[in-house]
Image: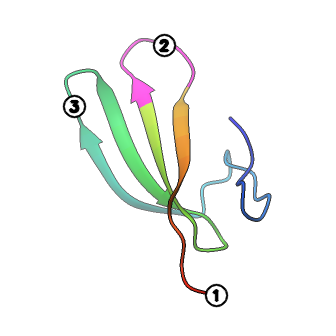
Amino acid sequence: MDDCPRCGWPEDETYQVLSRHLTSDGVVTYTRCACGEVQLRFQPYDLGQIVSAGGLSRPSP
């Protein structure tokens, strides 16, 4: 996984878990970085790596 694209916070140090949902393919988790960036993470049920996508919403400066 990469660091937060907005502030560089390490993604392996999750600041806050907003929600977690089971799907037919794996677990979808919405997290919030220390800077406020909301990120979506997907963990397939197989033992592979976590796939993440950041930048879902950006708080107004």
For the stretch drawn in magenta, what is the main secondary structure?
loop
Q: Which residue is mark 1?
A: 61
Q: Quadrant of residue 34?
A: bottom right
Q: Which residue is mark 3?
A: 23
Q: Amino acid at mark 1?
A: Pro
Q: Which segment is the magenta one? A: 43-49
Above-or-below relation of 39 to 7: above
- How far apart in space, not on screen, are marks 3 and 2 (Cα)? 16 Å
Q: Earlier in the sequence, mark 3 or mark 1?
A: 3
- How far apart in space, not on screen, are marks 3 and 1 (Cα)? 34 Å
Residue 4 is labelled as none
Cβ atoms at labels 3 and 1 below 8 Å apart: no
**Foreground: disc 3 or disc 2:** 3
Q: Amino acid at mark 3?
A: Thr
Q: Secondary structure at mark 2?
A: loop
Residue 47 is labelled as 2
Percent of width and height locating residue 38: 50, 62
- Choose between 40 and 56: the one closer to the eye: 56
Q: Residue at x 33, y 34 (%)?
A: 27
The N terminus is located in which quarter?
A: top right
Q: Alpha-carbon neighbours of circle 2 within 10 Å: few (<14), some, or many (≥20)?
A: few
Q: Residue at x 58, y 73 (%)?
A: 36
Percent of width and height locating residue 35: 66, 73
User: For this view, does 21 lie left or right of residue 42?
Assistant: left
User: For this view, does 4 lie left or right of residue 20?
Assistant: right
Q: Earlier in the sequence, mark 3 or mark 2?
A: 3
